[in-house]
Image (cartoon, rainbow, N blue to C red):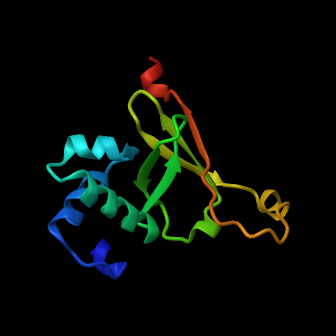
Amino acid sequence: DILKTHQLRVTPNRLAVLAVFLGQDRAYSLADMEGLLPIDRSTIFRCLQTFSESDILERFNDATGNYIYTMAQEHHHCTEQSHLHFKCNQCHSTISLPHLPAEYLAKLGKHKMETLSLLIEGTCQDCQG
């Protein structure tokens, strides 16, 4: 249903990639996905790219400069993404944090935002104990 809603062709590879994300509050990199799926790297990359462009997944750079992907909490365009995410570096769980205050974004004035990737990395409460 998610693929059809976003007017994307339903293929076994897309379903397999999407299935990894469904029900998981976790971030995955391309390398993570390669280890989980019996699909070649370029096909996984194209799926991730398509899902990111279609607002099914959100894409962020982590501290190492690699892209990581999470299920989008809302379906929106990149210019409307105004919330932070927290990623645990141990269990790789991610949570969405509240939207940034309107006055914070208003400081940008008439600047055109093309990408807004806000990621906080650390250790979650469960992994600390």
In the displayed structure image, the side of residue 72 where residue 103 appears, left or right: right
- Say if 123 sits above or below 109 in the image: above
**Nearer the observer, 97 or 63:** 63
- Which residue is found at the position 82% from the left and 62% from the top? 108
**Nearer the observer, 42 or 129:** 42
**In the image, residue 39 lies at what x, y percent?**
17, 53
**Nearer the observer, 21 or 30:** 30
- Which residue is found at the position 49% from the left and 38% from the top? 87
**In the image, residue 76 lies at what x, y percent?**
54, 71
Considering the image in quadrants, where does the C terminus appear?
Answer: top left
- Which residue is found at the position 39% from the left and 63% from the top? 49
**Nearer the observer, 126 or 27:** 27
Identify the residue at the far bottom of this view. 7
Identify the residue at the far front of this view. 42
- Which residue is found at the position 30% from the left and 41% from the top? 32
**In the image, residue 66 lies at what x, y percent?**
47, 42
Considering the image in quadrants, where does the N terminus appear?
Answer: bottom left
- Say if 81 sits above or below 92 in the image: below
- Say if 80 sits above or below 31 in the image: below
Q: Quadrant of residue 45?
A: bottom left
